[in-house]
Image (cartoon, helix red, strand yellow):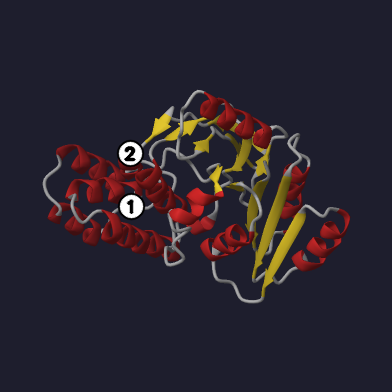
Amino acid sequence: MRVTVYIPTKNRKDALARALDSVLNQTYQDLEVIVVSDGSTDDTEAYLKQKSASDSRLKFFIKAKSEGAPAARNLAIKSSSGEFITGLDDDDEFLPNRLELFVDYWTFLKNHNIHPSCLYTPDLIYRDGVEINQSKKLGHVGHEQIFEFNHIGNQIFAPKSVFLEAGLFDEEMPAWQDMEFFYRVLKLFGKASLLDIPTQIMDDTPRTDRISIKARNKLKTAYQRFTFKHCADSKRQSQMLQLQMFSRYYNVRPDISDWVSFIKNGFWLKGLIVLIAATFRLK
């Protein structure tokens, strides 16, 4: 069965080269990789033309204007020929057996009449090129657990039909596109299952955009859109989702407007304690 791997990219030719090689050098070879250059102004296009000339499994799209990662992913997914699909960020890498393990595990579960919506794995966390940690994840994740934390991460492995029927990535989400999409997948198709072997290197090198005003505004807009779409019947879920904005990962502190919107959704002592800690924590 063919597996399609999508990679959105923008102005990261050197990182893209490492990511792309990590896919093309997989032990599982029945694959295609679709790279979407989202308004790149460096020499990404020339690199992709040269690379695709020597490997027919590589396809690519060049977008003159940047429209964001969700639109790039959706273009690749709709253009894919694989029975299964997974993705890769251009600054991350696959370990050599990632796709083989996904296919084998999916087949194993199917043979035992177990039908998860999708699969996901732990990650090897790298910072400045050095491994610093390995993520620990739940064995199964249901859609309601997404409100407390994105337990899946940033990539899933699933049949193409799952991506299409769940509605693909929301191109209006300025952040949390993965999490919001996963929520719809899990709600529609059931729980996701963990393949408990780290098969991906995730780059966690600190970036200044995580603490910028622009990044904060994107998070707030994403939170508002997520709650509008999915939290109409649960103020508690809205509060749980809001707290995710103030994790140490984003390094964003609540302001007065955040406190007001949180309290409007009702009294929740545990949530208030988390909000207080986020407000007064040291950088």
In the image, is residue 140 above or below residue 1? above
Q: In which quarter of the image is residue 149?
A: top left
Q: Can residue 236 be seen in this view?
A: yes
Mark 1 or 2, nearer chain start: 2
* Foreground residue among 235 and 262: 235
Q: In which quarter of the image is residue 229?
A: bottom left
Circle 1 SS class: loop
Residue pictured at 33% horizontal, 57% vertical: 226
Extreme right residue here?
A: 54
* Foreground residue among 180 and 110: 110
Residue pictured at 42% horizontal, 38% vertical: 151
Which residue type does callout 2 highlight?
A: Gln
x, y percentage for residue 263? 15, 53
* Foreground residue among 56 and 9: 56
Could you classify mark 2 by the number of other residues whose Cα lies within 10 Å: few (under 14), some (14-19), or many (20 or more)?
A: some
Which residue type does callout 1 highlight?
A: Arg
Q: Mark 1 points at which residue?
A: 253
Q: Mark 2 points at which residue?
A: 145
